[in-house]
Image: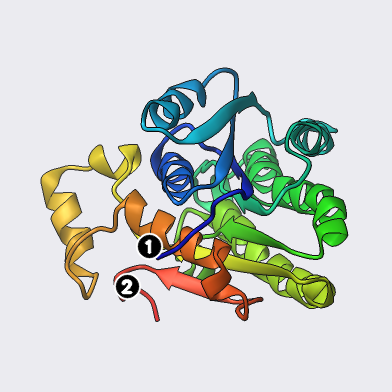
């Protein structure tokens, strides 16, 4: 059984969907979870974790704001003396065919999905190097591996996370820090629930396991990579997509 007792984990985009599930699963395995999201959006998941006997705190964070990553890390170290796990989950999509895509939509997606992961990963390295250990886990997407029409900005950001993580893994391995990616396929979220039944069936037919994934499927993969059981795994992409892309 995975045991993360006493470890401190930061999860960005923790207010809903995959991020919410990751925060809940990490807390269930014993981690102290710093759930970060805009405004007070992370408060409900933190309340649920605490009510279930877990340890968590909500933090207001705009991942694109200059200095926000450094401030979050400094506050976390001040309160808990360490950071063991960073989950770069915050992300947005602004889909459009490239011919019509606005520069603002390109910049916003890259800033949120990729540049923020750079800033947060860089910020946690100092405490992790001092500890001689840590886990950096970034949430990419099957789209970052396969591409998808109308998502050039999103695909670029998610593919960028993969290259970024592979380079980072080589830089920090000697310090006992691992860096890995989880690449979800089509997951049951607010966005997919908005699809018509026929559209959902069509998507499911393209998945060898014949179902959409759940946020819990992704959270389980993250917990594994955060654990001692994954101590010899770094620079890897763990695809959790039901066989949709291999």
The residue nearer to you, when weighing 60 against 25, is 25
Q: Is residue 76 left or right of residue 7?
A: right
Query: Regarding mark 2 in the picture, which secondary structure is present there?
Result: loop
Residue 205: x percent and y percent?
17, 67
Point out the residue furthest to the top here: 40
Q: Is residue 209 left or right of residue 162?
A: left
246 in relation to 131, above or below: below
Report the disc number at residue 185: 1
Residue 86: x percent and y percent?
65, 51
- State the image quarter where residue 159 is shown: bottom right
Q: Is residue 159 left or right of residue 94?
A: right
Residue 54: x percent and y percent?
45, 36
- State the image quarter where residue 116 is shown: top right
Q: Are marks 1 and 2 in contact (CB under 8 Å)?
A: yes
Query: Regarding mark 1 in the picture, which secondary structure is present there?
Result: loop
Look at the image and tell me whether residue 66 can be seen: no
- Graded by Cα atoms within 10 Å as few (under 14), some (14 to 19) or many (20 or more), the crowding at tag 2 reads many
- Kindly identify the residue that appears in the image at 63 percent across and 26 percent down: 59
- Kindly identify the residue that appears in the image at 47 percent across and 53 percent down: 150
Q: Quadrant of the N terminus?
A: bottom left
Q: Which residue is mark 2?
A: 244
């Amino acid at each position: 059984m995975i045991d993360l007792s006493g470890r401190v984990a930061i999860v960005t985009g923790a207010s809903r969907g995959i991020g919410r599930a990751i925060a809940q699963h990490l807390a269930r395995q014993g981690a102290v979870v710093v759930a970060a999201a805009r405004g007070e959006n992370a408060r409900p998941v933190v309340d649920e974790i605490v009510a279930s006997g877990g340890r968590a705190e909500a933090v207001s964070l705009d991942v694109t704001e200059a200095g926000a990553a450094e401030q979050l890390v400094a506050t976390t170290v001040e309160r808990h003396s360490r950071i063991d796990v960073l989950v770069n989950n915050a992300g947005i999509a602004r889909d459009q065919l490239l011919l019509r895509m606005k520069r603002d939509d390109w910049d916003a997606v890259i800033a949120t999905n990729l540049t923020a992961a750079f800033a947060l990963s860089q910020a946690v390295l100092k405490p992790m190097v001092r500890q001689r250990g840590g886990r950096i886990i970034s949430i990419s997407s099957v789209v970052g591996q396969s591409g998808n029409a109308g998502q050039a900005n999103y695909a670029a950001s998610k593919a960028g996370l993969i290259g970024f993580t592979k380079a980072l893994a080589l830089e920090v391995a000697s310090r006992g820090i691992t860096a890995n990616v989880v690449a979800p396929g089509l997951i049951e979220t607010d966005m997919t629930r908005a699809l018509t039944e026929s559209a959902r069936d069509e998507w499911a037919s393209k998945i060898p396991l014949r179902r959409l994934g759940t946020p819990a499927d992704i959270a389980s993969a993250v917990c594994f990579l955060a654990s001692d059981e994954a101590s010899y795994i770094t620079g890897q992409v763990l695809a959790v997509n039901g066989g949709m892309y291999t």
